[in-house]
Image: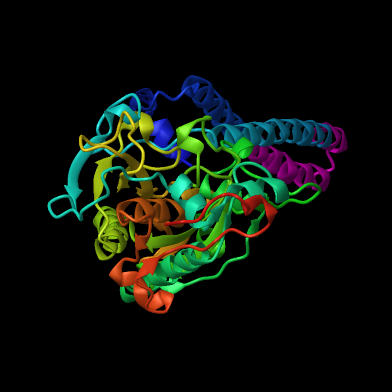
Amino acid sequence: MLDRNYIRDNPEEVREGLRVRGADVDLDAILEKDEEWRDLKARGDDLRHERNQVSDEIGELKQAGKHDEADEAIERSQELKAEIEEVEERAAELEEELEEALLRVPQVPHESVPEGDDEDDNVETRREGFDDLRDLPEEVTPHYDLGEELDIIDEARAAKTTGSGYYFLKGEGSQLEHALMQFMMDVHREQGYQDVFPPIPVNSESMTGTGQLPKFDEDAYKIEGEDLWLCPTAEVPVTNMYADDILLKDDLPLKHQAYTPNFRREAGEHGTETRGIVRVHQFNKVEMVNFVEPDESYDRLHELLDEAEEVLRRLGLPYRVLELCTGDLGFKAAKQIDLEVWAPGDDMEDGPERGGRWLEVSTASNFEAFQARRAGLRYRPERHESTEYLHTLNASGLALPRVMVAILEYYQNDDGTVTVPEALRPYMGDKEVIEGHEPVGESALGAGEKD
């Protein structure tokens, strides 16, 4: 949430921030409500001051025996009381309307964010891992076909138990997911992260605190009859751990990592983009959440990006780095940097020249004080000083299904097996190759055998 004083004192700066975002926000209406609210607060102060004066006069008049004048003063005091109540009631209504309106105002982009309309205007800053690519099959089998052939990904049975947009991982597929999760968390422990295993349901206050509500309520799963939502990202419970707390300067920077399943309704358009496990309603990831002092947050953003990149470097996966433009920036972020891994199995229009496609696996985000103001995240710079809002950042480290897609396609062999990246072998019982297994049940009869 933007500070109301900041909006009031810098309306043109905020207006420009909304323009470059393409945000449809009636800032004039907010400023008008704020002006009326301030006028009412001032009017209320004046009325209370007058009532205090009248109350003092009543006692003096009674002591002086001026009972008629005292009665008139009492009547005036009652009129002032009613007027004060009316002013305060209207001010409270405006306060609620302002808070609701401010919850829908996006963050102002940092001055370093490139201006643009949408994802086509994002700026690629570098590519890593393309100078020494491994030898790939002449035709790389997309992960959704390969997963079916190896019988390690089963979307059909998940459709029966749950619906479209879900999947079973079986055998070595499940092993690979667990290996990735443990590997990522070990990497981040080396980087100074403290593990957190949060509850999966989160309440509306927490969703509002991190900016998922009210803006994205249609993308989240609400538990019927409860003030609970299925976790859309570990960012929500982990950030809100410290809601309304006061941290100390010595606590910062505070770095937490959390592995959770995540649930989102949005699963993309029909077609190649949604085949397999790229865009699904339930997925797992490791999330890194940082709490820092304001003057350190942009240095920390680039360190956070490097911490996420380390996972890709150790896995040997080629990737690129993108700075998001103003039109593609997330609602609550002042600046965001994406990591997109290369998956060579499907040729997409926006893929690299050598074919394949890019898959976003992490977005490193600096929210500045936007979440802190909503959730009440404060710290005390010195023990004798007033509290200030801290800055929050996060990044996925990484989104597991898409990393799995990249591994199945990039580490694919001519015989249809998949080489296990060296960094993951200790987590898979030193297994070097994923060979899959035969399907079970009558549906598998006549399907032929793998070579």
Q: Is residue 243 visible?
A: no
What is the quadrant of residue 309 in the picture? bottom left
Side of 305 relative to 266 (left or right): left
Give the residue displayed 71% in from the left and 52% down from the top: 228
Give the residue displayed 38% in from the left and 24% down from the top: 15
328 above or below 284? above
Question: Residue 401: percent from the left, percent from the top?
Answer: 46, 53
Side of 450 relative to 12 (left or right): right
Question: Residue 249: percent from the left, percent from the top?
Answer: 36, 70
Question: Residue 210: percent from the left, percent from the top?
Answer: 52, 49
Q: Residue furthest left?
A: 131
Secondary structure predominantly adopted by residues drawn in magenta: helix
The quarter of the image holding the C terminus is bottom left
* Color style of the picture: rainbow
Count of numbered labels shown in the rendering: 0
In the foreground, 412 or 253: 412
In the foreground, 371 or 365: 365
Q: Is residue 446 visible?
A: yes
Give the residue displayed 19% in from the left and 51% down from the top: 128
Side of 224 relative to 50 (left or right): right
Give the residue displayed 38% in from the left and 45% down from the top: 141
147 above or below 238? above
In the foreground, 175 or 290: 175
Question: Residue 337: percent from the left, percent from the top?
Answer: 30, 45
- Residue 65 among magenta residues: yes
The segment highlighted magenta reads 44-73
In the foreground, 36 or 311: 311
- Residue 211 among magenta residues: no
